[in-house]
Amino acid sequence: TGTTRPQRLLRAVQERATRGDSESVIAAIDHFCRHQEWAMNVGDEKGFILDSVVSEVSPQTALELGTYCGYSTVRIARLLPPGGHLITLEFNPNYAAVARQVIAWAGLEDMVQVVEGASGDWIPHLREHFGIESFDFVFLDHWKELYLPDIKLLEECGLLRKGTVLLADNVICPGTPDYLEYVRKSQSYESHYFGSHLEYTRAEDGLEKSVYLG
Ligand SMILES: O=C(NC/C=C/[C@H]1O[C@@H](n2cnc3cncnc32)[C@H](O)[C@@H]1O)c1cc([N+](=O)[O-])cc(O)c1O
Ligand SMILES: [Mg+2]
């Protein structure tokens, strides 16, 4: 018994961050991960790259695969344009519960929908369930072996349009070799690698940005 790491991360947010201040929520989580316990959030260095891509796309519709504690959810949602909406899929109900509270503490609950369940089960139902025509932006940060099957499913379900931007975390560490090969070889994608470091460490990691060409 006792608390889980996500619950301790949430407590750090509630103790250190100001309600409604998304920047202070992000800072509180980064502080917790640097000084208390490492956790698999995209982090501040890769988060800065995520911020720049989200700002450039300025998505009306965004999808995140793998919410975990909601750190990248907050980073994305705080940069959405007016009317923008983010759907984030999370398999683990305990993580989803923590993420909802982190997102609420940041005051972003109106722009975000945390959907509990497996990406492979939910993707085929996003259109009918949420009235989504297609996504402007997709952030991939769930199990690394699901990146490739899930973008193929997004393609098949017609949820990508000419210009949809995919941004994938951890393409070096832990690594997503089959996904990388696919987006870099496929005529349907224009890909670019942003080199960085594994969150809160000096290990190499990076983000792959892939624009769907239709
Ligand atoms: O393993 C990593 N991430 C996996 C992330 C997994 C998260 O996505 C959910 N999920 C999984 N399949 C799902 C399917 N559908 C919905 N949620 C799902 C899991 O319940 C978890 O909340 C990782 C590991 C390291 N690392 O250094 O080892 C660093 C990172 O940045 C990482 O992202
Ligand atoms: Mg990650």
Image (cartoon, rainbow, N blue to C red):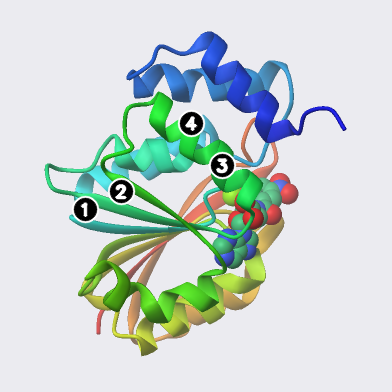
Q: Earlier in the sequence, mark 4 or mark 3?
A: 3
Residue carrying label 1 = 57
**Is the C-beta separation of discs 2 and 4 under 8 Å?**
no
* Amino acid identity at mark 2: Val
Q: Amino acid at mark 1?
A: Val
- Quote the CA–CA distance across marks 1 and 2: 6 Å
Mark 1 and 2 residues: CB-CB less than 8 Å, in contact? yes
**Residue 97 numbered mark, or none:** 3
Q: CA distance from mark 4 to mark 3?
A: 9 Å
Check if mark 2's residue and mark 3's residue have beta carbons within 8 Å: no
Q: Amino acid at mark 4?
A: Val
Up the image or down, 214 lies above or below 51; here it is below
Q: In what element is the residue under mark 2? A: helix
Location of the C terminus by quadrant is bottom left
How many angstroms separate mark 3 from mark 1 (CA)? 29 Å
SS under mark 1: helix
Mark 2 Cβ inside 8 Å of ligand 2: no
Whichever of callouts 3 and 1 sits on the residue coming sooner in the sequence is 1
To which residue does mark 2 refer? 53
Q: Is residue 106 left or right of residue 26?
A: left
Image check: 205 left or right of 184? right
